């Protein structure tokens, strides 16, 4: 073996050592907390002599927990699960054992609480909690199925996945608790107490993931420290002999010898299939779908729900459902295992899916969605999603999206309050129309809207209109609502009375709510204050609300509220919220062949003009 090959091998050993150990710590931190036991067991305190003999594993745990907000909880729970082992494979196995044990216990306990509960709303809220906690465990399992395929060349993507997954876990728990807001029993308080340690550990995991870049920088992994390679040591994270440990571990030797293509962690074989690319660019008449739905009987099924029974679970290739023109009165849920599903319609005004579930009738907001999308890599084109319950029925969701890497092109989402629930993970909307009154785009996803129209409807008397309600509760969550090159206008019914109903860009649904509006047209219906409060002064200093390079009569910022959370950003910062930078849109949006601008439109248009002029000169 040449010296260059040896150096490259050591570089990979060092990187895999760090990645593996930090991943184990994060996963243990999140999964240990899933239990909904009401009583937290207390660990016996170690005496002084025992502290002096801390194993290398415990030292590593202490270092990993350093950047967390709940350090004591982090150290106690990791020490309890990992023990004194220094074997990476055993640590991973311990993480899985904890995950499965606590997931089963959580499901059992939530079912027990539900069976004892008499209040219908509380029962429904507990059902939602069980589903969301199950989702968190599924994401854990999905991520660690790929643990033996870590690769330094994809570390940035892996880290981005982990942050999104950990953020979604936090959002899942908060959504669980939100479901008890309109209940009259103490079930919500019980659940809040039960999830306290779980939430702490989830946030600790996100803190660790956020600090990983700094740790890697200290170790000079990108250039790889010459001293590190010469000494064969990793002097931090609690170990002095990781290299030797890994070289002697057959599991990691297999890791280093594995030359297979490495998928993005947590998204097995995530590559946009060639067939999917052709599909995205095809017109309805040229599509070759797997199933056709038609109300007139000319397809394979007359209802979408019937067609969904044919969707293969955990598919690696796109499964295309073509829905012909018609109004389909159905409530649909694309479950977690329905991945790589594509819905293609005849147009957002022609192919309509409508329902009327609502919170006023006792349904949790999470369950009111006409269409709920939970499986990753979902795609919809030329479809209208509607909740027709009306303004008097309060929260009534038309579309809820939990799907990671989901894309919606030329679709409409119509409702009043809480129309579009961008719940979590990475989402992209292009050339869509979203209508509503109160908080009609809400949630805690990392989501970008491009070339979309936000149509503000007439609300009930004495109500006000708020377009967005972003729900980030931890400052480290990589989430935000980003609206770019879009339009905010009043619906015809609102135009003559728009002065009677104040309209705002958004309000904080979480303490660290983050919304950025870029290069968009704001009509005069937007109040000069721009933003408004929820139900008090909380979140006003910690939110992040920014407007950049917008236009139109409602875009003047001189009269905006002066909270500390209102931020003025420059072009470089605004560029960071465009899809190419914000969530690496080039890797998963661009291949789907929908119209897409990775950066700022102003810069993009200038480049196009230069390109056109250059061609003209050449001719």
Image (cartoon, rainbow, N blue to C red):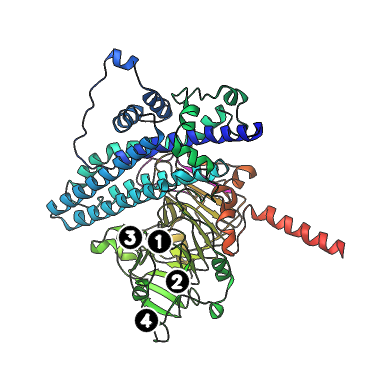
Q: Earlier in the sequence, mark 4 or mark 1?
A: 4
Give the mark nearest the N terminus, 3 or 1.
1
Q: Secondary structure at mark 4?
A: loop
Q: Which residue is mark 4?
A: 302
Residue bearing mark 2: 384
Q: Position of residue 63 (x, y in %)?
A: 42, 25
Is residue 212 depicted above or below 607 in this figure? above
**Horizontal side of residue 597 vs 50, given as left or right:** right
The residue positioned 36% from the left and 71% from the top of the image is 308
Which residue is found at the position 42% from the left and 47% from the top? Answer: 143
Mark 3 is surrounded, within 10 Å at the Cα level, by few (under 14), some (14 to 19) or many (20 or more) other residues, namely many
Q: Nearer the viewer, mark 1 or mark 2?
A: 1
Question: Could you tell which of marks 1 and 2 lies nearer the N-terminus?
Answer: 1
Nearest to the eye among marks 3 and 2: give it: 2
How far, Cα to Cα, is label 2 from label 4?
A: 17 Å
Q: Is residue 156 above or below residue 586?
A: above
Indicate yes or no whether the magenta region holds residue 147.
no
The verdict on residue 541 being magenta is yes
Dot in front, 2 or 4: 4
Rendered location of residue 179, percent (x, y): 27, 52
Quarter placement of the N terminus: top right
**Residue 555 visible in rendering:** no
- Pick whichever of labels 3 and 2 is earlier in the sequence: 2
Q: How many marks?
A: 4
Question: For mark 2, does the 10 Å Cα neighbourhood hold few (<14), some (14 to 19), or many (20 or more) residues?
Answer: many
In three-dimensional space, the C-alpha distance between marks 3 and 4, rounded to whole angstroms, equals 29 Å
List x then y, in percent, for residue 377: 47, 60
Task: Identify residue for label 1.
Answer: 314
């Amino acid at each position: 073996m040449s010296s260059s090959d040896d150096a490259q091998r050591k570089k990979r050993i060092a990187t895999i050592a760090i990645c593996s150990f930090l991943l184990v710590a994060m996963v243990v931190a999140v999964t240990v907390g899933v239990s909904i036991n009401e009583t937290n067991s207390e660990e016996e305190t170690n005496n002084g002599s025992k502290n002096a003999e801390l194993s290398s594993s415990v030292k590593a745990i202490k270092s990993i927990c350093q950047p967390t907000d709940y350090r004591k909880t982090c150290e106690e729970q990791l020490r309890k699960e990992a023990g004194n082992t220094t074997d990476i494979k055993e640590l991973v196995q311990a993480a899985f054992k904890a995950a499965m044990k606590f997931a089963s216990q959580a499901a059992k306990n939530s079912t027990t609480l539900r069976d004892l509960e008499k209040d219908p709303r509380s029962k429904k809220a507990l059902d939602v909690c069980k589903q969301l906690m199950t989702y968190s465990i599924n994401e854990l399992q999905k991520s660690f199925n790929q643990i033996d395929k870590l690769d330094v060349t994809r570390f940035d993507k892996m880290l981005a996945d982990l942050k999104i997954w950990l953020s979604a876990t936090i959002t899942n728990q908060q959504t669980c608790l939100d479901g008890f807001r309109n209940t009259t029993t103490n079930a919500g308080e019980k659940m809040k107490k039960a999830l306290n340690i779980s939430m702490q550990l989830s946030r600790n995991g996100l803190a660790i993931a956020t600090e990983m870049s700094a740790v890697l920088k200290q170790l000079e992994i990108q250039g790889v420290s010459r001293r590190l390679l010469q000494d064969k040591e990793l002097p931090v994270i609690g170990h002095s002999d990781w290299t030797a440990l890994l070289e002697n571990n057959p599991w990691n030797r297999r890791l280093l010898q594995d030359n297979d293509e490495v998928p993005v962690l947590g998204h097995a074989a995530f590559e946009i299939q060639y067939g999917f690319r052709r599909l995205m660019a095809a017109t309805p008449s040229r599509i070759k779908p797997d199933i056709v739905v038609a109300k007139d009987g000319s397809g394979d099924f007359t209802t979408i729900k019937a067609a969904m029974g044919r969707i293969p679970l955990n598919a690696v290739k796109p499964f295309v459902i073509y829905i012909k023109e018609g109004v389909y009165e159905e409530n649909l849920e694309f479950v977690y295992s329905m991945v790589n599903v594509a819905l293609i319609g005849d147009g957002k005004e022609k192919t309509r899916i409508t329902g009327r579930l609502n919170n006023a009738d006792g349904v949790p907001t999470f369950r009111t969605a006409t269409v709920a999308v939970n499986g990753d890599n979902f795609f919809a084109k030329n479809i209208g999603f509607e909740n027709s319950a009306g303004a008097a029925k309060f929260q009534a969701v038309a579309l809820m999206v939990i799907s990671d890497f989901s894309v919606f092109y030329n679709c409409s989402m119509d409702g009043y309050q809480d129309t579009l629930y961008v719940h979590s993970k990475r989402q992209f909307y292009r050339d869509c129309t979203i209508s509503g009154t109160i908080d009609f785009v809400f949630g805690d996803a990392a989501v970008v809207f491009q070339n979309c129209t936000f149509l503000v409807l007439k609300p009930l008397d004495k109500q006000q209109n708020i377009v967005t309600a972003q729900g980030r509760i931890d400052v480290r969550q990589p989430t935000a609502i980003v609206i770019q090159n879009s339009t905010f206008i009043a619906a015809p019914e609102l135009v003559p009375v728009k002065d009677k109903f104040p309209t705002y860009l958004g309000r904080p649904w979480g303490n660290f709510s983050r919304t950025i509006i870029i290069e968009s047209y704001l009509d005069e219906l937007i109040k000069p204050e721009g933003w408004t409060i929820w139900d008090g002064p909380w979140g006003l200093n910690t939110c992040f609300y920014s407007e950049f390079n917008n236009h139109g009569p409602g875009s003047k910022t001189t009269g905006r509220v002066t909270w500390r959370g209102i931020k003025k950003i420059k072009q470089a910062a605004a560029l960071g919220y465009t899809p190419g930078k914000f969530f690496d849109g080039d890797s998963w949006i661009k291949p789907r062949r929908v119209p897409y601008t990775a950066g700022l439109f102003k810069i993009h248009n200038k480049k196009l003009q230069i390109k056109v002029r250059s061609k003209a000169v050449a001719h």
